[in-house]
Image (cartoon, rainbow, N blue to C red):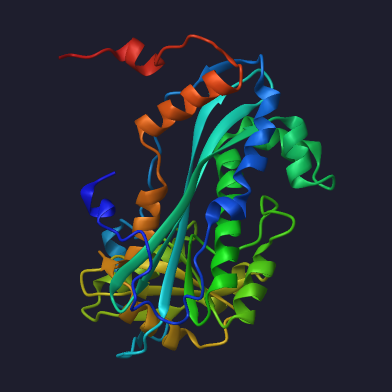
Amino acid sequence: MNNQLNLLPPSVDSDVPSSFAQKIDLNIAFQKDKLQSKLISLSGKRVFFRSDFSKESIPFVDSNPLSTSCMIPYQVRELKSSSRERLIVGVDSSCALIGETEDGAIYAGRVAIVYASRSAIIKYCRAGPIIFYLDPSTLQSELGAHISPKVVRLVLYDRSIAERLIRTQLERVAQAEVCKSCSDTILLVDGSLRSSILEPRSLTLRDLEHLCEENFNQLLGISKATSFKFISKTASSLQSLSQSQIFVDLTDSIRALIPGVESRVLIAKFSSNSQVFRVDFSYRNTEDELQVLSDLKYNDLFFRGYPETLRLAHHLSVFDSATISSVRSYLSSKCGIIQVPSDDLRSTILGKLV
């Protein structure tokens, strides 16, 4: 963890907006002891600890230079100057594969919440590492009896889907705690707003939107990447414009391709040297997108055009090698596992030149 993150205050300032109603205890929210009690099923199992945690990022803006034409077939709207004080809350999580057994896998998850107002970070909190052991019976119980065994096997065999399951569960609980404890807040979610079979059965996206609506909170999803080619082209064109603090609404075009889209889809640039991001705007939000985005720009900080609350939540949630080693030591000493010796195959084969 770098020094910049360590400088964040661990408690609420006296100048925190009144919308921050109470302190959140994430450990209570997650019932950590109850979650970890499931690890008793690991006793006596042979575990192969993993060492490859690399991931590749996908650029959001189209790399084709011909796509940077300034001709945008959408209305380009400018953010207005705002001096409205309100709380901005960013939630993000991370998950790491710790080890594998003959019939399942062990993961560690962590989630972080960062608060900002008036262009200043005022508080953060996080929970984790929380250890998850996913095997067929645990997954069937978590996903519900209505989920087919094929989906359960897919989660077991695909590491990326398993990690997404854990991150979705962690983030939904943290987001719900924010919605219950804050009002007149802008809640930022990393990624798009869409329902998933990986959501907790008791806390779906619809439930989260309802909680936001009850306390007059506004829900936004911020995405750094997209699978739609025409969104990338529009983002490239928007980035090439000299104007700053602008956005366009692509909802109608998206709905033509996906009639069941669950939010308004915007593309926004928050500063002149900014990257361009997709912004999902919940249909249940009680304010219009111009007001919400303008308030977001006024109250959050932006690093290369990206909300600082989400950036810091990411850094506060990621795992380093020391934390992963600690989780392994905990499992070895407390859960009675039998560690299977293993080597880093990449290092073994490639070696080092120096």
Location of residue 74 (image quadrant): bottom left
Please give the name of the residue rendered at 59% of the width and 80% of the height, measured from the top-left corner. 215
Please give the name of the residue rendered at 72% of the width and 38% of the height, measured from the top-left corner. 139
Residue 313 in sight in this render: yes
In the displayed structure, would residue 20 be above or below residue 222? below
Residue 224 in sight in this render: no
Q: Position of residue 352 (x, y in %)?
A: 22, 14
Q: Position of residue 345 (x, y in %)?
A: 40, 15
In the displayed structure, would residue 340 be above or below residue 169? above
Q: Nearer the viewer, residue 2 or 134?
A: 2
Q: Position of residue 213 (x, y in %)?
A: 62, 80
Q: Nearer the viewer, residue 25 or 337?
A: 25
Q: Nearer the viewer, residue 88 or 195?
A: 88
Q: Quadrant of the N terminus?
A: top left
Q: Position of residue 64 (x, y in %)?
A: 31, 57
Please give the name of the residue rendered at 40% of the width and 80% of the height, measured from the top-left corner. 17
